[in-house]
Image: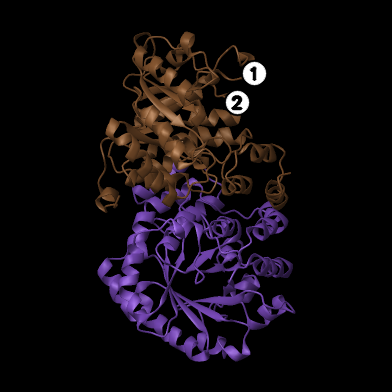
Chain colours: A brown, B purple
Amino acid sequence: MEKEIRQLIGYRKKIKVLDATIRDGGLVNNFAFDDEFVRALYLANKKAGVDYMEFGYRASKELFDVKDYGPWKFSEDEDIRRIIGDIQDGPKVSIMIDVGRCDFETDIVDKADSPVDMVRVACYLHQIPSAIEMIEYCKDKGYEVCCNIMAVSTLQEGELREGLEMVASSGVDVIYIVDSYGSIYPEEMARLVDLYRSVVGEHGKELGIHAHNNQQLAFANTIECVGDGVNYLDATYNGMGRGAGNCAMELLLGFLKNPKYKEYQVFKFVQDYMVQLKKTGVVWGPDLQYIITGLLEQHPRSAIAFTKEGRTDYANFYRDILLGE
Amino acid sequence: MEKEIRQLIGYRKKIKVLDATIRDGGLVNNFAFDDEFVRALYLANKKAGVDYMEFGYRASKELFDVKDYGPWKFSEDEDIRRIIGDIQDGPKVSIMIDVGRCDFETDIVDKADSPVDMVRVACYLHQIPSAIEMIEYCKDKGYEVCCNIMAVSTLQEGELREGLEMVASSGVDVIYIVDSYGSIYPEEMARLVDLYRSVVGEHGKELGIHAHNNQQLAFANTIECVGDGVNYLDATYNGMGRGAGNCAMELLLGFLKNPKYKEYQVFKFVQDYMVQLKKTGVVWGPDLQYIITGLLEQHPRSAIAFTKEGRTDYANFYRDILLGE
């Protein structure tokens, strides 16, 4: 798709920005955000014009012990209601459920009885049949529904097409490209969008992008997608997210030209809350260990362990991964 | 220019990578690198297959007091010779001279008597007549010569064309696009490359890219340029450079597929030297104050001052710039 200069000056009203700070950032601090932080973030998102705020996962309390996590691992309706309180006309609310890690049939109630607007179903390609069951369940309950297919960089085009065709035939509203390993370059991203659109387009589904910052490309890949017609954009304040983090909200709102977006509010929240959070020792961002897993198209878990151990012997880390040790 | 998938798998032999760690990084630590560091970097560049290493500026000792700076503000031939010593077949050597800040007629000798291979002339658009004088002088002395036109994001297309036409008509070998403020998005970069090529192409000059990382786009803009046929690529270890820093060498060599490039050597140097350097308190990288000057297309000097003062009141900084205070 040829990009037009007017896309840099004008804007598309259909674009929706989703703040995933609590959900993806929660993977860094075990979801231990206090209520004041989450409420201030909800207010900041409202003032900044952000369209959706993802509060967290709704994980199974059978599989995960509530004592081991902050509340946003489970994001119960009552937790969300407590945060929103009397705030009117704030961003829409989303939660994420992972295939095999949630009890959607008991934990997802009718939308009419919930503060949640959108449910995002995360899955790997081989889990798509289970994902579709969850998508249809949530759609029947009245929610907007996304499907986030993870780790697409490692998939064959044929199997990806097959999976996309299945999801696109479901009741899903938005299908997300998820660069889980932060390994995709913008040129590849443009081709992925073309592929997604070629399969999904005739079904009238929207596309979304959730990027990781291993190679300092989360923002670049996200705006590449904007140029290619993707309308659902994930970002997080200060780029907070697992490992190398995500597309930074402050960069994204600065780029988008819709006057409803106010990046000043993002700078304000970072100044008032994120600086303090960082001082507590919570660490994320594109340090070299994440560049290495991104470059080698690997899950960041080894890089996260490297970070936790306070290691800086990057070359040893690279060699060990290359040699499979 | 349509990009081709094979550019991501194959490689162009004409691509040259230039390490600007000492020169642009020197703007952060006042050029106070010790000899061991610089020699280890030269060796790392040799092992990593880097084509050029820029040792520093050759600034006027009339205008600048040698007591106020480390040696790489002046990068005298004897300093460079001392570093290289008996190392054979290392990267080519470049130095930078700024219009109005050097004494080229006394300080640049015949190439036959110098360890320098390439002289890069940095200028703003209005200085191009002076730059051309310097270019012709250095060319006559036998050097490869580049012209780095700074702050191009703020120029009108007409005046830029005019300036490019003048430079392209000189003896210059390479003309660099310099995103001094880190404000250019990849789509704009692609258009700039087209513009440069349309003026410069018929003169048979090469193009180069020197990117800054204010919006986390230095690497993205550099590889955008690779896709558009730009052959001279600046990078620095760990992205070290003024303010938000530059395109990181570890990312760039990971992306380039020419087998001669060995990113392992970059990780090794970062592990052995850059980690230690950072511990001394030298600070660079795309913190929010640099995002803000990038977004607002401003020189980073106010952000550098903000950094030095240890401030984190980003929203106040943004507001003050917006209001012109």
Please give the residue where the numbered disc 2 appears in the rendered image: A30
- Rendering coords of residue A208 (x, y %): 38, 35
**Distance of label 1 from label 2 (alpha carbons):** 8 Å
Decide which of B13, B33 is in the foreground and name it.
B13
- Quarter of the image with the C terminus of chain A is top right
Label of residue A68 in the image: 1
Host chain of mark 2: A
| Side of A118 relative to A302 (left or right) | left
Give the vertical position of A47 relative to A315 (above or below).
above
Q: Badge 2: how crowded within 10 Å, few (<14), some, or many (20+)?
A: some
Residue at image position (48%, 91%) is B140
Residue at image position (49%, 56%) is B219
Residue at image position (28%, 71%) is B159
Q: Are marks 1 and 2 in contact (CB under 8 Å)?
A: yes
Host chain of mark 1: A
Badge 1 element: helix
Task: Please name the amino acid that badge 1 sits on.
Answer: Asp
Q: Badge 1: how crowded within 10 Å, few (<14), some, or many (20+)?
A: few
Decide which of A268, A299 is in the foreground and name it.
A299
Corner quadrant of residue B224: bottom left
Corner quadrant of residue A290: top right
Badge 2 element: loop
